[in-house]
Amino acid sequence: MLNINEDDLKIAIVAKVADEILSEQDDLSAIIGKEIKRRIDAIFVDRAESQIQAAIDLAINGSFEREYCRVTAFGEKTGAPTTIRKELEKTVDEYWSASVDPRTGKLSTSTYNNQVTRAEYLMTQICAEDFTETMKQSALNVTGALKDGLRNQLAKHMDGLLNDLFRVKSLQDQGKVEKPY
């Protein structure tokens, strides 16, 4: 039996591993360098992207809130100072509240006929399309039920006429063959 000292064996293994690592120091240094560079690049990308996005958001929000004055072709200021946000709100509000012809939806300046806003016209069209589709589906359902009812009633009437005309029990009457209707 061999007498092996476990502590000596562990020390020898650690020494062997240390020698292997030190002999491959150039390879190990390259691997460690690549991993450090990869991690630094990842951290830089994460932080840089968030800072860039924050700067872009700040610039955009600032430009929407920055006041300006309209100018003429000669560079003279006209009107009160305003912002892009206020102008957008005004444009959107004017678009949806514009008076349109209730039949065509086209812009109308006439005060003779009943006018509606573009928003009212659009909502009416959406509701009308939905109502039309619902009515079509309901009509199809009723028509299908009517067809099935007529088919069943005609089948019963036809069976009665055939039974009165012929006193013989057919295969269909006996239930041996399925009826075609």
Image (tube, grey):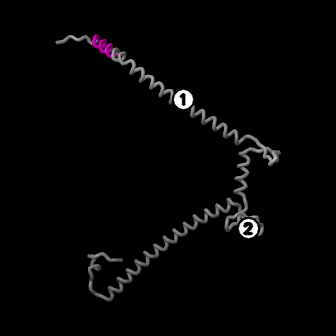
User: Which amino acid does the dot numbered 1 rest on?
Assistant: Phe
User: Which amino acid does the dot numbered 2 rest on?
Assistant: Asn
Residue 143 position (above or below residue 122): below
Q: Which residues are magenta?
A: 7-17
What's the residue at 55%, 69% (across, down)? Answer: 135
Residue 153 position (above or below residue 32): below
Total labels: the figure holds: 2
Give the secondary structure at mark 2.
loop
Q: Nearer the viewer, residue 70 or 64?
A: 70
On the image, the x and y values in percent for residue 33 come to 45, 23
On the image, the x and y values in percent for residue 112 come to 77, 69
On the image, the x and y values in percent for residue 100 come to 71, 63
Which residue sits furthest bottom?
Answer: 165
Residue 15 highlighted magenta (yes or no): yes
What's the residue at 63%, 64% (across, down)? Answer: 125
Q: Quadrant of the N terminus?
A: top left
Q: Residues within 10 Å of mark 2 (few under 14, many from 20)?
A: few
Q: Quadrant of the C terminus?
A: bottom left
What's the residue at 31%, 12% (across, down)? Answer: 11
Which residue sits furthest left?
Answer: 1
What's the residue at 46%, 73% (across, down)? Answer: 145
Return the residue at label 2. 114
Give the secondary structure at mark 1.
helix
Residue 84 position (above or below residue 153): above
Q: Give the distance between the C-alpha atoms of the residues marked 1 and 2, in whole angstroms.
A: 63 Å
Where is residue 75, by image quadrant?
top right
Which residue sits furthest front?
Answer: 74
Q: Nearer the viewer, residue 30 or 119?
A: 30
Choose the circle earlier in sequence order: 1 or 2: 1
Return the residue at label 1. 44
Q: Main secondary structure of the magenta part?
A: helix
